[in-house]
Amino acid sequence: MSGDDDILLRAKGLTKHFGEFTAVDGIDFEVRKGECFGFLGPNGAGKSSTMRMVGCVSPVSGGELRLFDLDPATDGPAIRARLGSCPQRDTLDEELTVQENLWIYGRYFGLSRKEVRTRAAELLDFAQLSERAGDKVEPLSGGMKRRLTIARSLINSPEILLLDEPTTGLDPQARHVLWDRLFRLKRSGVTLVLTTHYMDEAEQLCDRLVVMDHGRIVAEGSPRELIAQHSTREVLELRFDVDDHSRHAEQVGGIGERVEVLPDRLLVYAHDGDRASADVHARGVQPLSSLVRRSTLEDVFLTLTGRTLVD
Ligand SMILES: Nc1ncnc2c1ncn2[C@@H]1O[C@H](COP(=O)(O)OP(=O)(O)OP(=O)(O)O)[C@@H](O)[C@H]1O
């Protein structure tokens, strides 16, 4: 069991208003030392607004927030000195070289010229960018720029690294390289807090996560716990050549635990997908394709909200 000393970040009834609008609606969560904690939810769920409050760049409208037992309202600079923050969009200086981007940031954090050079070299090695150290940032690939942004956010050796949508816009290979770097960081003891609307990213990286929708937390747990609590073990996906999936939903009604109709397919939630598939065929239903897969966090989200993460 982790003791209270292990809790680096604690929110209770955390709220963010923009005028009349409530973007974050009284959420509770705790992040423990050394874990990767995630906020999973669709666009507009309130993930970035939460991260900005945690990063001490946006004031809390209501509730309590503590990082390292400190209050962002009064101890912002002391907290920020122990945080790294990787925003949703890269804010690198494209006119400068790769290493100059790190040097400038290091100087901003008060590192000496010598310390900055040593730390920058270590971080470029970590980010697999040593060979590009003297190159301008502008021509780098999207994945390289993201890795440089992460390297930059580590210049002050933070205890917690905040990552807002770390792999949005990257191709699959670049995402995997980045995930690998984040795994290494976690192994080295850095606590990671990230937002994502990619369920595979949440499943790959997060020890624990909260699912957010409309500013609220709708579920919390490890990926495995969430799937066990809110979905079946397997899902049978059926595709038909006509768009009338509702009619086919009636034909397979009663098979498995429940049936979900999506615009392009039917999902039959069943603990035993092969058995459900056999039952479908026994009824004479002939889908164009049929696939049994394990349940994912996407299914959890669909069950909890009736929508897919990319709606
Ligand atoms: N500065 C602002 N002023 C007014 N409304 C805002 C502001 N920032 C965010 N919002 C609104 O708050 C809601 C939550 O936005 P937020 O960016 O936190 O969501 P998100 O889950 O991070 O989604 P995304 O992945 O699109 O960033 C949205 O409806 C958004 O339009």
Image: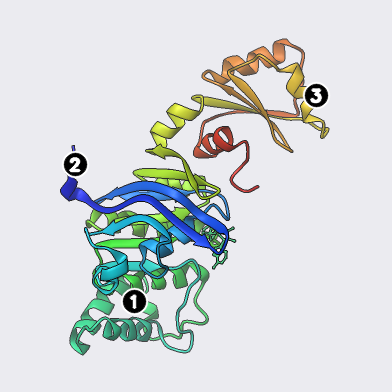
Q: Which mark is residue 247?
A: 3
Which quadrant of the view contains residue 50? Answer: bottom left
Q: Whole-percent x and y of residue 268?
A: 63, 24
Give the Cα distance between marks 2 and 1.
38 Å
Which quadrant of the view contains residue 220? Answer: top left
Badge 2 crowding class, 10 Å Cα cut-off, few under 14, some 14 to 19, many 20 or more, is few
The type of residue carrying mark 3 is Arg
Front residue (pair 134, 110): 110
Confirm if mark 3 falls within 8 A of ligand 1.
Answer: no
What residue is disc 1 on? 130
Front residue (pair 223, 83): 83
The type of residue carrying mark 2 is Ser
Give the residue drawn at x 40%, y 50%.
38
Q: Determine whether 105 is above or below 14 in the image.
A: below
Is 227 left or right of 235, judged from the image as shown?
A: left
Which quadrant is home to the N terminus?
A: top left
Give the residue drawn at x 33%, y 86%.
104
What residue is disc 2 on? 2
Q: Which secondary structure, mark 1?
A: helix
Give the Cα distance between marks 3 and 1.
58 Å
Front residue (pair 142, 208): 208
Give the residue drawn at x 52%, y 80%.
139
Q: Whole-percent x and y of residue 24?
A: 48, 54
Decide which of tag 2 and tag 1 comes sooner along the chain: 2
Decide which of tag 3 and tag 1 comes sooner along the chain: 1
Circle 3/circle 1 CB separation < 8 Å: no
Which quadrant of the view contains residue 166? Answer: bottom left
How is this picture coloured? rainbow
Circle 2/circle 3 CB separation < 8 Å: no
The type of residue carrying mark 1 is Ser
